[in-house]
């Protein structure tokens, strides 16, 4: 198995024990960006069921970074320079005189700020060691004013995230069935795809109905994009079907 699959197995083995607190050391290292996003989102869902997940993470993309409810940023000497919501970190440092270039990944920019690579517009002779005291001053002021630094939660998974994760997973299975590589499947190929993914093949009537929903009436072929769009919107179709029978 690949390194990414081995990492997923290791995480799964830990989850079998139903831990109250799960510690992870760089669970996304070695994974592509979409696999990393899927991994963190799955762990986020587990946290909503009552588990606490604590991890060190290396160079996350921003859409992944903002899924965290709380982040701890450490400066030189392992001293705290920020402890609060992921979505509030950028605003905090910008409010203290640091400016992020428009095209730069905020998560990478935060690391540059902590290492002293970003100049400070408010402090002429800024040194990264000052960040600890700046944080302590901010923390004390927040306490005096009754401000909860952890009130903002991580962002929910969005439609674009769902689409990216599904597209990545679908590619792995689709390419095993679509041997001619034309990114389209007929009824027999679709039945094989369902059998491979769900361990059961739908009947001809069900398959015909699904192909009609994906590609329109009388469709003989379904493209990968049509199949993916159908999967992303499946919860809406189910809701409509349920409503029509009430």
Image (cartoon, rainbow, N blue to C red):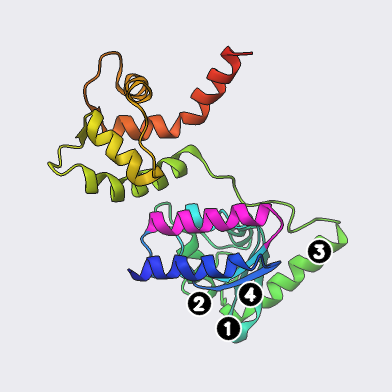
CA separation, marks 3 and 2? 25 Å
- Residue extending furthest left? 180
The tag earlier along the polypeptide, 4 or 3, is 4
CA separation, marks 4 and 1? 9 Å
Image coords of residue 83 (percent x, y): 68, 67
Q: How many labels, in total? A: 4
Image coords of residue 215 (percent x, y): 29, 22
CA separation, marks 3 and 1? 23 Å
Disc ID at residue 115: 2
Question: Residues in magenta?
Answer: 33-51
Q: Is 86 drawn above or below residue 180 in the view shown? A: below
Q: Is 187 drawn above or below residue 177 in the view shown? A: above
Q: What residue is at 55 percent from the left and 63 percent from the top?
A: 98
The tag earlier along the polypeptide, 3 or 1, is 1
The tag earlier along the polypeptide, 4 or 1, is 1
Q: Is residue 40 magenta?
A: yes
Disc ID at residue 76: 1
């Amino acid at each position: 198995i690949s390194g990414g699959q081995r990492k997923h197995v290791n995480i799964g083995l830990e989850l079998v024990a139903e831990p109250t607190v799960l510690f992870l050391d760089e669970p996304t290292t070695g994974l592509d960006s979409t696999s990393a996003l899927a991994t963190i989102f799955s762990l986020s869902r587990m946290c909503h069921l009552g588990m606490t997940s604590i991890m060190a993470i290396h160079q996350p993309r921003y859409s992944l970074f903002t899924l965290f409810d709380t982040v701890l940023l450490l400066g030189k000497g392992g001293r705290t320079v920020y402890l609060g919501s992921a979505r509030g970190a950028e605003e905090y440092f910008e409010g203290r005189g640091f400016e992020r270039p428009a095209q730069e990944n905020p998560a990478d920019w935060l690391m540059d700020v902590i290492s002293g690579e970003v100049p400070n517009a408010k402090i002429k002779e800024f040194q990264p060691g000052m960040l600890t005291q700046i944080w302590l001053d901010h923390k004390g002021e927040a306490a005096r004013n009754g401000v909860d630094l952890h009130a903002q939660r991580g962002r929910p998974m969005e439609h674009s995230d769902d689409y990216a994760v599904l597209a990545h997973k679908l590619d792995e299975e689709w390419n095993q069935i679509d041997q001619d590589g034309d990114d389209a499947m007929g009824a027999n190929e679709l039945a094989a795809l369902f059998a491979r993914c769900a361990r059961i093949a739908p009947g001809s009537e069900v398959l015909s109905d699904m192909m009609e929903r994906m590609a329109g009436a009388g469709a003989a072929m379904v493209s990968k994009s049509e199949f993916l769009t159908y999967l992303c919107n499946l919860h809406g179709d189910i809701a409509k079907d349920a409503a029509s029978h009430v």
